[in-house]
Amino acid sequence: MSEHFHVNTPLLESINMSKLVGTTVYLKMENSQPSGSFKIRGIGHLCQQLAAQSKGVVCSSGGNAGMAAAYTARKMGVPATIIVPSSSPQLVVQRLQDQGATVKIIGKVWDDANAEALRLAESDGLTYVPPFDHPLLWQGHSSMITEVAACLGPGVKPGAVLLSVGGGGLLCGVVQGMKEAGWTDVPVVAMETAGADCLNAAVKAGRVVTLDDITSEAKCLGAKTVCRQAFQYSQSSQPAIISELVTDQQALHAVKTFLDEERVLVEMACGAALAAVYSGLITRLQNEGRLQSDLRPLVVIVCGGSSINMEQLAELTRKLQR
């Protein structure tokens, strides 16, 4: 494999967040990937393995997976068809078209768009690019932990890794990377917003469940069913997965605080992970004994997101301040 489509992203220390939790907080800045989010790692890797001789790729995505697939396809010189649900902002559709992709709007939620993507892959002989549920994706995503471990240096482990969960692809990749780095004793704090909580619902039920609907504004966390591998990881203690929820309001507050303090705009889906720090959840987990009281540095995966701009932010603020 000669060429990666992703870049090695910075690991930055956040003074403000460190002050809040009383330990160093490092930010893995996946928002600085060429497609705007971490998705390019897994999708770039999968396309290199599966789509080199392809007639084209098809991906179902309300945003970031589609952006990554469109970017990768453009770099590889193959056509991309991205199927998005009607809940996707116009901004996303425009950005996908700017990457040279054909965009089709099908159905209300991701699951509808995905059914169409699978149908097209079959009928038109296209390479199907799943947004989160595939071992090659997880293998690609695991590279971010390899980078973090290299930055922290030999023998240095974080106190916990914080990330957001949508369909579970990031979680699977991070766990795989942690196993490879020998970090199986480091807990993962897996954050979702209430209303897009397919992992948390599965953890509570003790089995994979399908949500009736996505009611959260964090549309990019909007898979109604978590991938089976992510659920299986949540049932294991190595590493321990701590599944927690924040409200949309808390996620939005985190997005705005992050913009003010770190001068970076991320989407609500990413805000869920940041809210673990800003909402005091980390401190609560320490008080409950689920995280150590003398906590080693925290690593927060800033997964990014391409479906946010100032107009979207104002719109979310209007919706959520009712």
Image: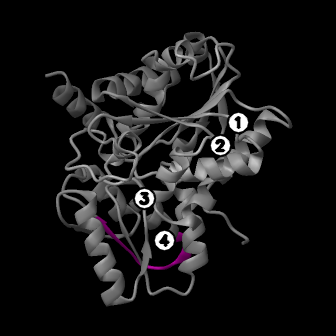
At label 4, counting other C-alpha atoms closer than 10 Å, the crowd grade (few under 14, some 14-19, many 20 or more) is some
Query: Given contact means CB atoms under 8 Å apart, are the residues at marks 2 and 4 in contact?
Result: no
- Quadrant housing residue 256: top left
Q: Earlier in the sequence, mark 4 or mark 1?
A: 4
In front: label 4 or label 1: 1
Q: Badge 4 is on which residue?
A: 74
Looking at the image, is mark 2 or mark 1 earlier in the sequence?
A: 1
> Does the magenta segment cover residue 76?
yes
Mark found first going from the N terminus, 3 or 4: 3
Residue closest to the eye, 61 or 104: 61
The label shown at residue 204 is: none
Q: Is residue 254 magenta?
A: no
> Which residue is rendered at x = 56% and y = 23% of the image?
290
Q: How many numbered discs?
A: 4
Residue at label 3? Answer: 65
Disc 2 to disc 3, C-alpha distance: 28 Å
The magenta-colored residue range is: 74-83
Report which residue position mark 2 lands on. Answer: 238
Determine crowd level at label 1: few under 14, some 14-19, many 20+ residues with C-alpha closer than 10 A: some
Which residue type carries mark 2?
Answer: Gln
Q: Are marks 2 and 1 in contact (CB under 8 Å)?
A: yes
Residue under the image location 29 percent in, 52 percent down: 224
Judge depth for marks 1 and 3 and give the one in front.
1
First in residue order: circle 2 vs circle 4: 4
Foreground label between 3 and 4: 3
Select label 2 or label 4 by which is in front. Answer: 2
